Image (cartoon, rainbow, N blue to C red):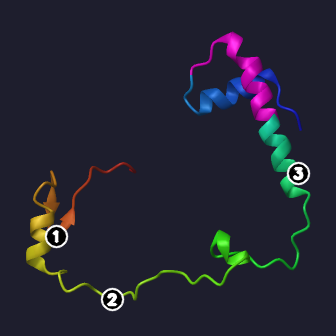
Amino acid sequence: MALTDSDVIRIARLARLHLNPDEVPGLQDQLNQVMGLIEQLQSIDTTGVAPLAHPLSAIADIGLRLRDDEPLATNNEQTRDHLMQNAPARQDGLFLVPRVIE
């Protein structure tokens, strides 16, 4: 699927990018190359291939470096209040933010 000039202009508008008319052909070529690579990747049959948790796990036995999900000893009310001193608005240990959805 090749992108047209109008597609490139629309993508630029959605990305909030200002394009000069002379920049459109070069960007169109670059985006078409990216779309070609995506089409190549989509054409590969990946059935039976297990997803990798780490890029190097295909060649070495690498475990994930995860810590136990436990509260830290420093998680207390005094530490929380100290960390929230710079918050412009807070209440009961929570950040107050302006409503964005009516």
User: What separation in Å lies between label 2 and label 1 (alpha carbons)?
Assistant: 20 Å
Q: Mark 2 against mark 1, which lies toward the viewer?
A: 2
Disc 1: CA contacts within 10 A as few (<14), some (14-19) or many (>=20): few
Residues packed near mark 3 inside 10 Å, few (<14), some (14 to 19) or many (20 plus): few
Amino acid at circle 3: Gln
Q: Which residue sits at x=10%, y=69%?
A: 81
Residue 32 sits above or below residue 93 on the image = above
Sequence-wise, the earlier of marks 2 and 1 is 2
The residue identified by callout 1 is 93
Q: Tag 3 or tag 1, which sits nearer the N-term?
A: 3
Task: Identify the magenta region.
Answer: 18-32
| Residue at the limit of the structure toward the front, as seen here | 60
Residue 26 lies, with reference to residue 47, above or below; the image says above
* Left or right, residue 44 beside residue 5: right
Magenta stretch containing residue 15, yes or no?
no
How many numbered circles are shown? 3
Q: In the figure, is residue 2 to the left or right of 64?
A: right
Residue at x 33% of width, y 88% of height? 70
Above or below, 35 against 77 in this view is: above
Image x and y of residue 96, in percent = 22, 58
Residue 41 appears at what percent x and percent y?
84, 55
The type of residue carrying mark 1 is Gly
Judging depth in this view, the residue of 57 and 53 nearest the camera is 57
Q: Which mark is residue 40?
A: 3
Q: In the image, which is nearer the foreground, mark 1 or mark 3? A: 3
Mark 2 residue type = Glu
* 29 drawn magenta: yes
What kind of element bears circle 2?
loop
State which quadrant residue 34 falls in: top right
Q: Which residue is mark 2?
A: 70
